[in-house]
Amino acid sequence: MKKIQKIRGAHEINPSESQTWSYLTKKITEIFESFSYQEIRLPIIESTSLFQRSVGEGTDIVNKEMFTFESKSGKSLSLRPEGTAGCLRASIEMGLTDQGPIRLFYHGPMYRYERPQKGRNREFYQLSAEAYGFDGVNIDSEMIYMSYKIFSFLDLKDYYLEINSLGSKETQQNFSKAIKDYLIPIKDKLDPDSQARLNSNTLRILDSKNPETQKILKNGPKIFEFLSQKSIEDFDLLRSNLDEMKIPYKVNNNLVRGLDYYNDVVYEWKSKALGSQNTFCAGGRYDSLSKNLGGRDIPAAGFSIGLDRLIISLSDQDTSKAKKRLIVIILEDNLLHAGLEIAETIRNNLEEIVVRFDGVKSNLKSQLKKAIKENYDFAIIIGNEEINKGVYSFKNLKKDDNQLSLTKSEVIKSISGVIENE
């Protein structure tokens, strides 16, 4: 019978790697919480129309990359390709946006039908922060600082921040017309993707990775020439805030992001370890999105961290401290309760340790040999002799020390000592 394999582009993480994923998720969400962001949990499946109205019908995401299917009742549903639209939809529906300014975060898988490559699976994992009801660039500054704090905490190397202003929707429309007028006479010199975008999503041409297209764009209109006075002042204030916070950045006038809902401030964190697909965190403002989804007209901003790509950027670093591992071994069937009791006592007193107890298995020598092979740090051995004396035989498997006869409290103290001295 043919072996069933995982779907191409789906993401699975083996036990040896999942500890890093859990550690990063925990640390990032702790930093979110320290800035008063609250967790919201969101569905993976949404109405297709949500993304058509938010992300944009002219985008590659909606036209080419969504996993869309029909429900039994005939409704068009899609696996979420990104989280912002769903988060704002839920916040409007729950009435959260009517309660005044609010900060939220969420994490989980997203889905896009793309060619799988380094740092880009069809199923990928994001951690995101969103803020509603905050006008002005101070919230953008806070979000950039929060992301900078995360990457500094992780001691990330060779990464950098790019920022830009897209201006208002009116600015984008005027600029889009100007760039289109400039490119139409030389359309044949553009790469095929840019030619296709010329009539559907003109601004995305700025983000082309084709060198020849980028050469053509250098002599074309620039978006900063179309910015309103307010957009210019906001962008200058953001730059001033970043300078005060000592966060280095580059202004990239071709940075547009791949979703239609953005306005004014946009930014991307990039890593040299990722190759051409080098963005691992991105965000910006989307002040018109709430109204487009049927809610009140409220300012909004957010960013997302791609955990898949972040982990690649950290691939040469030990991001998490592995927990110590202990195995409890009993020598007789009648000692099952004693084994369960000491295992649970250690779990309750020492969060930094993993405890395994299997009951009676093979002989003692075989169990110790297997425990050493599987990289366990400690073993507790319980026989009738130990029970009669009220002690446990304790062995540090990382050293050649003899077994020690210790009381329950002495076992806890010995393990704690090893953990504290590392």
Image (cartoon, grey):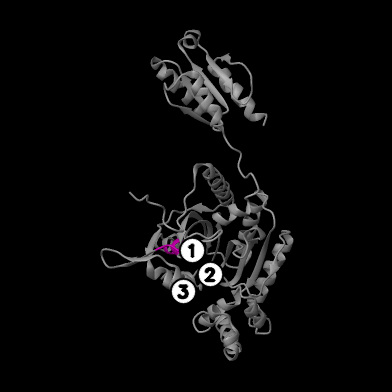
Say if 30 sits above or below 279 in the image: above
The three-letter amino acid code for the residue at tag 2 is Tyr
- Find residue 50 and report its horizontal and vertical position in percent: 40, 68
Q: Are dots 3 and 2 in contact, CB under 8 Å?
A: no
Asked if residue 198 is among those painted magenta in the image, a careful observer would answer no
- Residues tagged 1 and 2 counted as in contact (Cβ below 8 A): yes
| Distance Cα–Cα, label 1 vs label 2 | 10 Å
Relative depth, front residue between 379 and 7: 7
Disc 3 is placed on an element classified as helix
The CA span between labels 3 and 1 is 13 Å
Q: CA distance from mark 3 to mark 2?
A: 13 Å
Q: Which residues are magenta?
A: 79-89
Q: Would you name the residue on which mark 2 appears? A: 286
Q: Which residue is mark 3?
A: 56
Which one is nearer the viewer's eye here, 200 or 25? 200
Other-residue count near label 3 (Cα within 10 Å), few / some / many at <14 / 14–19 / ≥20? some
> Which image quadrant is residue 309 in?
bottom right
Q: Residue furthest front?
A: 1
**Residue occupying the far bottom of the picture:** 185
Closer-to-camera residue (145/201): 201
